[in-house]
Each structure stands twice: as C-alpha cells, then as structure tokens.
C-alpha cells in the first residue's frame, strides 16, 4: 500500500513539470529519440472485418506505418542513436487452421454436395471450408510488410518479440536494423526475421506539416516441413515501403499513410495498406490517438473495406 502511495505521489508531483515542458508537435518529432529520453507506447486493436467483427483483438495495431506495434519501449542511448523492444499479443476467436488453403469436403460420401461447416470441422471425415481468408486470400497478416499467420494449434497467438536499433545520419535520414523472433508457433510465415530500413522525414513547416517515408527489406529463415502449416522454403524475402504526411494544429495531429509491399521469394502479389491516425497531445510528454486501417486496397477477393482494423493508443515520454 505504501509503495502504491509513493508511486501515485510521484506521478502527481511530476504533472507540473510535464505541463511546463515545451511541446514538440507530432509533425516535428525526430526520427530518433534525443539522448536520455525514453518512451513507452501501448496500442490496442480489434479487427472490423466483414462478417468477422471483433473476432481478433488484443495488444497491437494495423497502422500502415507502424513497425513496432503493441507494447513498445524505446530510448535514446547516444546522440542520434535509439534502441527499442516491442511485443504484440492478439487473441483470435477462430483457429488459424481455418485459413489453410484447402477445398471443403463432403460430410459423408453418400451426401455429395453437402459440405461441412466450421462447427463440424472436428467430425471424422469432414473438414471446414476456408473462412475469413483475409485481404491476401490465405489468412496472411502483416506487420509493416512482415507476414505472419494465426496459430494452427489453438486460438491464442503471440506475435514476434522485436529488438531494433536506429541511427540518424542526418536529421532527415537514418538507418534501422531489427530482429523479430516468434515466441509461440514457429510455423508457416512465423519465422525469425531480419529487417533493414531507411527511415526518412522532412519537416516542411515547423509545428504544422511534415512528410515521412521508409523502405524496408526483410529476410526470414525457417526449417521447412511437409504439413500445410509448415514453411515450404527455407528463406522468405519480403519488401515494404510506406509514405505519408503529418499535419499538426495546436496539439491535434492527423497522419495519413499509404504502403506497398509483397514477397519477392517465394513470389506473392503485392498489397496496398492505408491508415488514418488522429490524435491529441494532452501534455508535452503524453499523446492519445486513434487510427483506422484498411489492410489492402487491392484484395485478392472482396472489397477494400472488407478487411479493416481499429487502433487506440497512447504514448508517454520521460
């Protein structure tokens, strides 16, 4: 009880200092944290997919420009150099195996044409057809270009833990190197992955408008296997680039980001995610924001707004 009181008192005492600090508007934030500054981000997300509203939710985000969603810790270690750690946890109300490419089979041989449904998927001799195949047609999801799939052994899915370092050569240009490691199902697309990125940001009007972009190259490695949920290639080479603009006005900020990515090897057609973020800087060190994303503007099946996500988040610097 005493410890809780001390923590609460420290937070209350720090509010005047936070309120008196100079506000750095969202559009002016540097591509790396200043030396000695630390930041914590927490994002909560839910799917709003057509026919599957709220079926997948948890600590994470679907924002097109977010490389490190979920719970994200970062710090300015040296001048122009930032390091960080991120993790994401999603809970799904359906099994990842529902995504596996396969044809539905009859419930019984003498009832050809009557196919099993999801509830009958565990009846011997029956198998559910594809469901909620997502914007790429096979259940693939993306973390800023890095593909992953929900677990095939259960409903919980914990995304990779990621550690990264980012260095700014110039105030507008830098380089980023990250390693993501899956901590649950190491199957399908869920493989250790290296990411090389080149972040760019240009402040067109201080306190008002900036533009940003980042191209990425990702290389993942995994052991292949014969089952449908196991990788069919040792290496997976993916690419991703996003670009957007950020507008700030008296603490309110609006960001619009469009991305493009795909898999170069084994080859897979590209996709275009889009996200809109709206937020407010309550105190100089505290932001609140909400975003809506479309996973793919050119889906393999259906319409662009069939696969969408909602994100709510907060960011605190200290």
Image: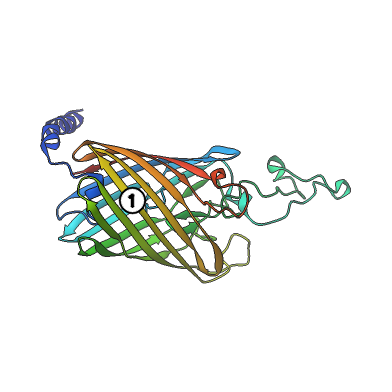
Circle 1 sits in a helix, a strand or a loop, which is it? strand
Q: Quadrant of residue 278?
A: top left
- The image quadrant where one finds the C terminus is top left
- Up the image or down, 60 lies above or below 13; here it is below
- The image quadrant where one finds the N terminus is top left
Q: Position of residue 47 (x, y in %)?
A: 50, 41
Is there any visible trace of residue 295 in the rendered image?
Answer: yes
Q: Position of residue 30 (x, y in %)?
A: 22, 54
Relative horizontal placement of residue 129, taking residue 180 as reference (left or right):
right
Q: Position of residue 87 (x, y in %)?
A: 37, 51
Is there any visible trace of residue 60 in the rendered image?
Answer: no
- The 10 Å Cα crowd at callout 1, few under 14, some 14 to 19, many 20 or more, is some
Q: Which residue is mark 1?
A: 245
Front residue (pair 4, 294):
294
Q: How many marks?
A: 1
Picture residue at 78% right of the left edge, 46% below the top: 115
Q: Quadrant of residue 315?
A: top left
Picture residue at 54% right of the left edge, 44% below the top: 305
Relative horizontal placement of residue 83, taking residue 36 as reference (left or right):
right
Front residue (pair 178, 23):
23
Picture residue at 41% right of the left edge, 61% below the top: 241
- Up the image or down, 194 lies above or below 92; here it is below
């Amino acid at each position: 009880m005493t410890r809780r009181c001390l923590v609460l008192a420290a937070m209350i005492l720090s509010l005047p200092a936070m309120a008196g600090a100079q506000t750095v508007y969202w559009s002016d934030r540097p591509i790396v944290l200043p030396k000695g500054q630390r930041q914590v981000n927490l994002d909560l997300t839910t799917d709003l997919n057509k026919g599957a509203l709220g079926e997948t939710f948890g600590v994470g985000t679907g924002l097109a420009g977010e490389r490190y969603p979920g719970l994200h810790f970062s710090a300015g270690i040296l001048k122009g150099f930032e390091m960080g750690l991120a993790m994401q946890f999603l809970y799904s109300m359906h099994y990842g195996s529902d995504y596996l490419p396969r044809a539905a089979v009859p419930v019984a041989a003498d009832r050809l044409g009557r196919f099993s449904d999801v509830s009958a998927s565990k009846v011997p001799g029956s198998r559910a057809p594809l469901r909620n195949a997502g914007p790429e047609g096979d259940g693939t999801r993306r973390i800023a270009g890095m593909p992953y799939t929900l677990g095939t052994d259960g409903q919980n899915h914990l995304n990779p833990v990621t550690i990264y370092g980012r260095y700014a050569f110039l105030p507008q240009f830098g380089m980023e190197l990250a390693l993501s490691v899956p901590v649950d199902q190491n199957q399908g697309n869920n493989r250790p992955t290296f990411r090389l990125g080149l972040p760019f940001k240009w402040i067109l009007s201080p306190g008002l408008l900036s533009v940003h972009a980042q191209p990425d190259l990702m290389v993942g490695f995994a052991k292949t296997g014969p089952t449908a949920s196991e990788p069919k290639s040792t290496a997976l080479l993916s690419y991703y680039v996003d670009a957007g603009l950020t507008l700030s006005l008296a603490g309110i900020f609006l960001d619009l980001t469009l991305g493009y990515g795909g898999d170069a090897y084994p080859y897979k057609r590209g996709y275009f995610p889009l996200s809109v973020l709206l937020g407010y800087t309550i105190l100089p060190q505290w932001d609140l924001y909400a975003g809506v994303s479309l996973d793919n503007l050119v889906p393999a099946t259906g319409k662009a707004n069939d696969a969408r996500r909602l994100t709510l988040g907060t960011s605190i610097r200290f």
